[in-house]
Amino acid sequence: MKVDTSRILRAALIGGIVSGIANLIVWVIAHQIGLTLAVPAMDPSMVDANGMSQVQFFIVFFASLIPTLIGGGLLALLNRFSANPYRLFQIITIVFVIISMGGVLGAPATGDKIALGIMHVIAGYTAIWAFTSMTSQAKG
């Protein structure tokens, strides 16, 4: 099934916003139960005494939205060059989520790893849901 490319940007925005909100809810719950959501620091200016960086509230939203927007571009390319763009997009998204878990594994606490892992899965699932459900061309 081919993709209605005129709907990709809308699907990306909706999927990214839904993912961002869902991940902010996870972030709030994690902090309410005492998790720090610390990960190895990529920016030396944001390092704490243990060499870790706390995942900030606003970063959660944009870290959900931006990859979904990029995913929209990927889906458009796959639609152009693949006979089955949705299936290939789903596979690439799942692989990307698994690879992105590498950063999660660097979190020092098990609870942090679980919460951050959930957030990655939410982002991947939401992207697949948004693009699959909102961009499929009507059969006719």
Image (cartoon, grey):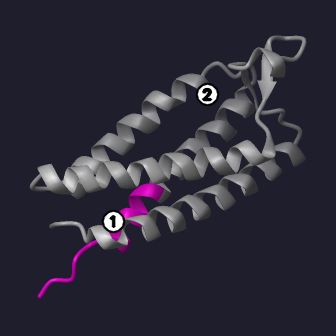
Q: Residue at x 73, y 54 (%)?
A: 24
Relative to 111, 125 lies left or right: left
Is 139 within the magenta? Answer: yes
Q: Please provide percent x and percent y for residue 94.
A: 37, 42
Amino acid type at circle 2 is: Val
Element type at mark 2: helix
Q: Please provide percent x and percent y for residue 82.
A: 13, 51
How many neighbours does mark 1 have within 10 angstroms: few (below 14), some (14-19), or many (20 or more)? Answer: some
* Up/down of 45 relative to 97, above or below: above
Q: Residue at x 16, y 55 (%)?
A: 80
Q: In terms of sequence position, does the residue under pointer 2 or pointer 1 come before the other?
A: 2
Q: Is residue 124 at least partly visible in the picture?
A: no
Q: Residue furthest bottom?
A: 140
Element type at mark 1: helix
Q: CA distance from mark 2 to mark 1?
A: 27 Å
Give the extent of the magenta segment: 127-140
Q: Please provide percent x and percent y for residue 23.
A: 67, 52
Relative to 42, 140 lies left or right: left
Q: Residue furthest top?
A: 50
Numbered label attached to residue 104: 2
Q: Quadrant of the N terminus?
A: bottom left
* Up/down of 37 relative to 30, above or below: above
Depth check, mark 2 against mark 1: the one in front is 1
Q: Which residue is mark 1?
A: 132
Is 72 within the magenta? Answer: no
How many neighbours does mark 2 have within 10 angstroms: few (below 14), some (14-19), or many (20 or more)? Answer: many
* Up/down of 124 relative to 139, above or below: above
* Up/down of 33 relative to 12, above or below: above
User: Which one is nearer the viewer's eye here, 67 or 98?
Assistant: 67
Quarter where residue 84 is shown: bottom left
